[in-house]
Each structure stands twice: as structure tokens, then as C-alpha cells.
Amino acid sequence: MSNIIQRYGLLSFIALLAIWLPIEAFAHGVDESTRAFLLQNTGVQIIPFLYIGAKHMVTGYDHLLFLVGVLFFLYRSRDVLLYVSMFTLGHSLTLLFGVISDIQVNAYLIDAIIGLSVVYKGFDNLGGFNRLFGKSPNAKLAVLIFGLFHGFGLATKLQEFQLPDDGLITNLIAFNVGVELGQFTALAFILLVINFWRKHSSFTRFATNTNCLLMSAGFMLVGFQLTGYFIN
């Protein structure tokens, strides 16, 4: 029984990765009902954009994998709040600025960089930078910078639908608030799993394996996106 409990943390994270890494189509994907709404949208639509933003974050496993890496070794609530705030600031700025200013960025390349952010965090958690260079990048600054790229990833999807100017800013704010609500929901689940796992010795024993899985998932995302870039 104790062995089953000890392995629970690792299995939970493997399940988490499996849920969010089924096929490329779900990466920043837009389902048909959402696509139809965005194509036909006119005027201010606060509630629908709140819902779309929340759903997009909950199903945006590339964002969530990065957050798993960020939170993995954070033990204090103050640190969790700080890092999540840096990430939120980053992706909120580029989401709003990218759409309003109509900054065109190749979606495949942006999503490949987002995949690299997952690789970076797993590698950093493994102490890879310290071993290779004797020093790790500034973690807070890295989270902010990658947050900027994650925001551009969100912006590229909305730009595909050429949203009308009527109510655009209000709808974007609603979408961003929805993203934060979805992020909060996902974070609550992730923190529950991590905190439960930390109570068992398997957390320390399988921490390396888990972060290797994060890196593998990140490399898979990079491969998917670069393949899409060169094919299309």
C-alpha cells in the first residue's frame, strides 16, 4: 500500500501530461463551435469571451506544462503568487498589445518557443544550467519573458478571426480575464497534486523523472510546431 501511495505523485503527473499531450491539433486549438462564434461575432460579448478565454487556458496544455515546471519547487505561497503574477503580466501585455496593434507573428514559431519554455523550465529544475554554466538564468525574468511569448501565442489565435473593431477592447479584456480564471482553476488542481505528492518520499525520488518528462513534452511541442511551420 505504501508503494502505491509513494508512486501516486509520479503517476498523477504522467496522467496530467497524457491528458494535455494527445495530439498536435489541441495545441492552442479552437473547436468548431468557438470558431463559428468568433467568425460571426459582432459588438460587445463579455460572457462568451470570458468562457472562451477560460476554456482556452484550461485546454492549453503548453501553458499549463510551463506552469507545472514553474511551481514544481516553489514551497511558499508568496513565491507562487510572485511567479504566477510575472507570468500573468507577461502574457496579458502581449495578448492585448498583439491583437490591438495587429502585430503579425507566425503562430508555429511562437508555439515552438512556448515549447522551448517548457524545456527550459524542466532543465532549470534539474539544475542543468548550474552544471553547464555554473549559474542559472534569473528565474523571475525568464518567467516574465516567456510569459510575453505565451501571450503572443494567445494573440495569434484571435488574430486568425479578424475580430471587428466594435467592442474589440472590451472583448479582449473579457477574454484575458477568462484566461486568468482558467489559469486559477488549473493552478488550484496542480497545487493540490503537488502538495499532496510532497508529503511522500516519492516526490524527491521521482522529481528528476518528472522534470525529464516535462523536457520531453516540451521537445515534442517544438517538433510538432516546427514540422507544421515547414510543411505549411
Image (cartoon, rainbow, N blue to C red):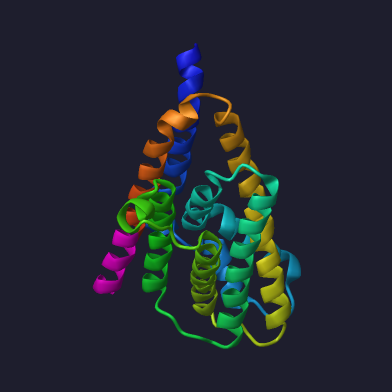
Q: Which residue shows up at 70% across the image and 50% down it?
A: 78
Q: Which residue lies furthest to the front in this view?
A: 134
Q: Which residue shows up at 43% across the image and 58% down it?
A: 136
Q: In which quarter of the image is the C terminus?
A: bottom left
Q: Residue furthest top?
A: 1
Q: In this view, does 133 lie to the left or right of 94?
A: left
- Would you identify the image quadrant in which residue 195 lies? top right
Residue 86 counted in the magenta span: no
Residue 226 counted in the magenta span: yes
Q: Which residue shows up at 40% across the image and 47% down it?
A: 214
Count all numbered tags in the image, as a single digit: 0
Nearer-the-camera pick, 6 or 102 = 6
Magenta residues span: 222-232
Relative to 171, say whether 181 is above or below: above
Relative to 181, say whether 144 is above or below: below
Majority SS type along the magenta span: helix
Q: Where residue 54 appears, x then y in whole percent?
A: 64, 58
Q: Where residue 60 appears, x then y in whole percent?
A: 51, 57
Q: In this view, does 110 lie to the left or right of 63?
A: left
Q: Which residue shows up at 66% across the image and 44% down it?
A: 76
- Would you identify the image quadrant in which residue 46 lies? bottom right
Nearer-the-camera pick, 214 or 33 = 214
Nearer-the-camera pick, 140 or 9 = 140
Q: Where residue 65 appears, x then y in whole percent?
A: 48, 51
Is residue 51 visible in the rendered structure shown here? no
Is residue 207 visible in the rendered structure shown here? yes
